C-alpha cells in the first residue's frame, strides 16, 4: 500500500495504517532528533512529540510533497521547541551528565572511546548556530539534497549553502583543534 493510501486510512482513524506510514521514517526521525539534541532521552522526547504533531497535522500534508521531508521538518521544529524550553536548564543538565558515571560494561575501554568520540562530535556541533547545525545535520549527516534541505527548513537555497559552508568550516576548525590538543597531550606524557 502506498503512502497516500496509508495516509487516507490513517486520517480515517486506522492506527495500523498510521504506524505503517511512519515505520519507514522512524529511524531517520530518531537519528535526526539525536543529532539535534545530543542525547537519547531528549531525542526520544522529540520523536514522541513529532509523532503527535504528525498525527495532528496529517490532514494538512499535501500529497505532492515528500513525506520524508515533511517528517524531518516536524522533527526539527520539535527539537527547536524542546531546545528553546531547555536552554535555561542547559548548565544544570550538563552538570548532571558530567556527574553521572556509567556502570561497568563488558569492554570499558571501548565504551570510554565511544563516549569520548560522541562527546567530541557534540562539542563540534555545539559550536554551530541552530541554523548551521540543522542544515549540517540534514545535508551531511542525513544526506538530503540542497533542495530537500530547503524544503524541510524553509530557507532559501543560498541561505542553506551559506549555513552549510559556515558549519563545515567551524566543524573542520573544531576537529583540528581536538587533533592538536590530542597531539599536545600525547607529546607531554
Image (cartoon, grey):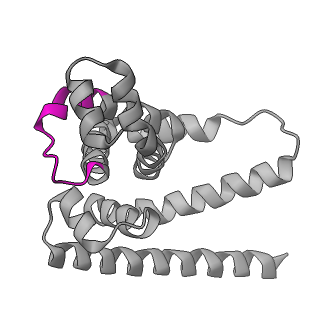
Quarter of the rendering occupied by the C terminus = bottom right
Percent of width and height locating residue 27 = 49, 45
Q: Position of residue 13 (x, y in %)?
A: 25, 17
The answer to whether any part of residue 92 appears in the image is: no
Is residue 187 visible to us here? Answer: yes
Q: Give the farthest residue toward the front.
A: 1
- Say if 135 sits above or below 100 in the image: below
- Which contiguous range is marked in magenta? 52-67
Question: As rendered, which of 128 and 71 lies closer to the eye?
Answer: 71
Q: Is residue 179 above or below residue 128?
A: below
* Left or right: 39, with 102 as reference point: left
- Find residue 180 and report its image quarter: bottom right
Q: Is residue 83 above or below residue 147?
A: above
In the drawing, does residue 130 fall left or right of residue 115? left
Residue 188: quadrant of the picture: bottom right
**Residue under the image location 70 percent in, 75 percent down:** 182
Residue at x 65%, y 34% (from the top left corner): 100
Secondary structure mostly taken by the magenta-highlighted segment of the chain: helix
Q: Is residue 127 above or below residue 146?
A: above
Image quarter of the N terminus: top left
Q: 155 left or right of 111?
A: left
* Membership of 35 in magenta stretch: no
Residue 47 coordinates in the image, percent (x, y): 39, 35
Q: Position of residue 141 (x, y in %)?
A: 46, 64
Residue at image location 27% in from the left, 54% down from the top: 69
Residue at left offset 40%, top offset 28%? 19
Amino acid at each position: 500500500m502506498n503512502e497516500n493510501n496509508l495516509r487516507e486510512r490513517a486520517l480515517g482513524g486506522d492506527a495500523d495504517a498510521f504506524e505503517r506510514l511512519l515505520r519507514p521514517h522512524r529511524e531517520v526521525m530518531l537519528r535526526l532528533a539525536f543529532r539535534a539534541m545530543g542525547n537519547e532521552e531528549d531525542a526520544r522526547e522529540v520523536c514522541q512529540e513529532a509523532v503527535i504533531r504528525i498525527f495532528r497535522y496529517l490532514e494538512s500534508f499535501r500529497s505532492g510533497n515528500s513525506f520524508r521531508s515533511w517528517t524531518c521538518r516536524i522533527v526539527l521544529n520539535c527539537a527547536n521547541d524542546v531546545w528553546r524550553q531547555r536552554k535555561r536548564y542547559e548548565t544544570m543538565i550538563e552538570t548532571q551528565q558530567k556527574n553521572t558515571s556509567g556502570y561497568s560494561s563488558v569492554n570499558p575501554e571501548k565504551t570510554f572511546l565511544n563516549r569520548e568520540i560522541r562527546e567530541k562530535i557534540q562539542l563540534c556541533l555545539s559550536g554551530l548556530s541552530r541554523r548551521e547545525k540543522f542544515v549540517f545535520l540534514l545535508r551531511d549527516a542525513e544526506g538530503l539534497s540542497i533542495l530537500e534541505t530547503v524544503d524541510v527548513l524553509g530557507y532559501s537555497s543560498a541561505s542553506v549553502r551559506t549555513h552549510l559552508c559556515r558549519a563545515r568550516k567551524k566543524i573542520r576548525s573544531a576537529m583540528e583543534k581536538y587533533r592538536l590538543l590530542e597531539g599536545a597531550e600525547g607529546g607531554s606524557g
